[in-house]
Amino acid sequence: MSKEQLLEKLHALDRECNLLEKAAAVLRWDQETCLPELGVEGRAEQLALLEGIHHEKFTAPGTGRLLEELGSVSENPGGDEKLAPPERDFLKVLRRAYDREVRLPPDFVAGAARAEGLSQAAWVQARKNNDFAAFLPHLEKMIDFSRRRSLYWGYSENPYDGLLDIYEPGMPAAAIEAVFGPLKDHLNGLLKKITARPQVDASFLDKEFDTGAQALFSRELLKRLGFDTRRGRLDLSAHPFTTTLGADDIRITTRYILKDPLSSIFSTIHEAGHAFYEMGFPREIRGGCLADGASMGIHESQSRFWENVIGRSRPFWQGLFPVLCGYFPKELRGVQTDDFYRALNQVKPSLIRIEADEVSYSLHIILRFELERDIFSGRLAPADLPAAWRTRMKETLGVEPETDAEGVLQDIHWSQGSFGYFPSYALGNLYGLQIFEKMCADIPGFEEDISKGDFGTIRQWLSDTIYIWGKRLYPPELLKKITGQSLKSEPFLNYIEEKYADIYEF
Amino acid sequence: MSKEQLLEKLHALDRECNLLEKAAAVLRWDQETCLPELGVEGRAEQLALLEGIHHEKFTAPGTGRLLEELGSVSENPGGDEKLAPPERDFLKVLRRAYDREVRLPPDFVAGAARAEGLSQAAWVQARKNNDFAAFLPHLEKMIDFSRRRSLYWGYSENPYDGLLDIYEPGMPAAAIEAVFGPLKDHLNGLLKKITARPQVDASFLDKEFDTGAQALFSRELLKRLGFDTRRGRLDLSAHPFTTTLGADDIRITTRYILKDPLSSIFSTIHEAGHAFYEMGFPREIRGGCLADGASMGIHESQSRFWENVIGRSRPFWQGLFPVLCGYFPKELRGVQTDDFYRALNQVKPSLIRIEADEVSYSLHIILRFELERDIFSGRLAPADLPAAWRTRMKETLGVEPETDAEGVLQDIHWSQGSFGYFPSYALGNLYGLQIFEKMCADIPGFEEDISKGDFGTIRQWLSDTIYIWGKRLYPPELLKKITGQSLKSEPFLNYIEEKYADIYEF
């Protein structure tokens, strides 16, 4: 067979595996948005079967042979150097996925999928009923599956590193600690400065905002941001998320809280940021393994860039606040744009990560990172998580949840076995601002664009600079290509220092 | 291997195939209720893949071997006569499905699934835009796939018989004609009698009924009927349908028409009737090939029984009309229960099948049956369908659609390649009333139950008498078991004659 024929066979296999992943994604999306209460077990069985079939197809001996015939081996995943760069990237990404998948026994894969489905449903109920004990056996199972997965991959000394590597290739716990340590100190310092200042007045938000009107505003927001509803949709779920069910079927969710209109606004913008990335992969890589984010950190850089750098900026609300007032004329009567801008940037350490301000947000993440690290090193038992959560929240942010629902049960991630994901959010903040520096240089008028509600130039820039690469480049390569540099915290810290010095006048 | 081991292997295979069918059902449900416009192609690919995998698993040589080792061959599908009756029924149903599936080439199966996905989406658009020409190429493809499917099954002389057999085993076109011929004459006679009488006044329904309130009433209705929302849900779609996504995940859809409140009410009740059947299969057959209706005719007997015999009855609205008035106090002010009962039973030949009265309904079906028969015999070209539709509507019901959207494009069935399905509705009317005679004898107080909104006894009776059998019995066997007789039209004709003689006073 010629190289072209071998590649075509491998692409066909990749497309087929991708279709199976997307079919499973439909089942998962449905589970979180629609599935009737008692349908959970059947759904878990369906997912276990699909995951099993995917595993069998992807790890069939033919896959390894095709990769090898194209020169792709674990030590040289890109294969034959005479291949065109996109094909070398394709081989690199596929080989990496294959090397991991082939080490997992089929029973393990199906068992994990089944357990995840049940665990996630149990989490929804446990959070609703504030019942950690009911969730604990599932959580233990998820930890066990994750640990075994990492052991299969060869991370016998530090299983947590294997999990981190899923989301941020090449960033083991030690590397993340090296970033998070100084970040934590810096943010704590900034928090102290801010809390020493007179507080921002956000009391006018302390009332009920009709959730129907919130829902209408979320749709208006998406329209203005340029979210293409022919290629996606917005729904409700217990925890906001984005999922790709097909190249032209990218869905986001949000939730509406009667006494907190900001929650749905910023989760909608956040998820839209993820969706833009997924919608922006170039046609030639769609439907295959390259149609994915460079890493979860880079993915979160996109969502958090839209949520914070754009969504919590002054120019953004200069354009949009009058529109919001149209949805809540009574509730927002007499409020000025700048009052609103300051209120939504109120820094106030609080309990819920996804509703946290930009300064304390990363501290929520670091807390989770440290808990995960301690769980996988064996220093912390799952049953002790609620207590550890409360203690560390008190230490880190000075607040303590009264219920586990507002504490250890608040996030969906662990229920799905996604340990090692959380650092992506804080890394995303850093990536996002580092990339933003370059964007500012390339689009001098971006602030004016934002205030006019014109996001076309920004989206085009992101598309040409980031989305276009899909998963072809590792995060450090992508960052280098865009900024010429490697990961650093300064752009984020400068941005946040400057923004909050202005708001809190120090 | 022992018989028990062989059976267990076959059950495991059946459960796995069933899970794949349900996963595909999730994707189809999503396509009709949620899928973004541009997601259609990706979805068609996903479905083609799942159907292909299902086909491959089900028709693998091992399946045939297992069946044979258990003595199940085409001539004796139930296998070894020493097996327990439920196992013999299991073998019979599985063998029948296997014999059909194994004759279809894998490419054909995947190609048909892909084409169906695209065709159905094209139909939604074509109906919306009243553009038959845009749908025609898809329709032709669906007809071609159906014809080839029937040819693969060996129906070379009358391909339509092979399609009919999918939905009503053992009822070829000639047998259906023998039933439909006299039925048509009888209904035409009844129609003449009715139209000679002063017409029922339904003018108070000729106004707008807020669709939001309609949606709330549909939910109220389901609650009162006893629809368990922990095991199912109600959604919106272009064409109402019921689908089973799992033993505890049975979903129905409806649609709300501003100027026709009856449409959503009766489609909701109709689909609930299907759902009750699907929810009622006994635990021991769930998740396998026996967890299905005896035939589509029997399935429609359940939906049309709830819709008409219960839903369009006087006692039903004696209980429920005050509730409806609570949702539409202004619109229904001054209307008496009996006015409403008569209005909703107004006999008025009209364009849309699913909104037709009980007298003309079966004539809509017979028209479709005749068109399908003529298409598959080659007497009618697909391109000539719109004209043929208009002509025959004029002949049959004296009305003629102004648009194809209200004519040949109104039903979803052909877009999904479901040729041969329509007769089930009219057969369902017959089965339903024949079964109802027995129910009346068994539950003397059923009318009082209905007027009190107590459907428990009726549902229990249906459960013990029909649902409990799942697909174990062929329709004639089931009918015999329940009524001691074979299919006959008299119970339906007596019921309809008596009911409308009362309403139209002749």
Image (spheres, coloured by chain):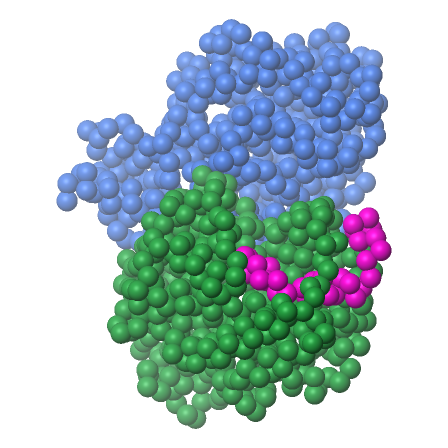
Chain colours: A green, B blue
Image quarter in which the N terminus of chain A is found: bottom left
Q: Is residue A393 magenta?
A: no
Please name the residue shown 51% across and 6% down the image: B444
Total labels: the figure holds: 0
Q: Is residue A305 left or right of residue B43?
A: right
Q: Is residue B331 left or right of residue A21?
A: right
x then y, percent, for residue B54 = 39, 52
Q: Nearer the viewer, residue B133 or B52?
A: B52
Please name the residue shown 48% across and 48% down the image: A403
Magenta residues, dominant SS class: loop
Classify residue A285 by image quadrant.
bottom right
Q: Is residue A331 magenta?
A: yes
Q: Magenta residues?
A: A328-357
Q: Is residue B501 left or right of residue A2?
A: right
Above or below B290: residue A355: below
Q: Nearer the viewer, residue A180 or B65?
A: A180
Please name the residue shown 43% across and 81% down the image: A178
Above or below A268: residue B402: above
Whether residue B295 is visible: no
x then y, percent, for residue B4 = 19, 38
x then y, percent, for residue B378 = 60, 45
Classify residue B73 by image quadrant.
top left
Classify residue B42 by image quadrant.
bottom right
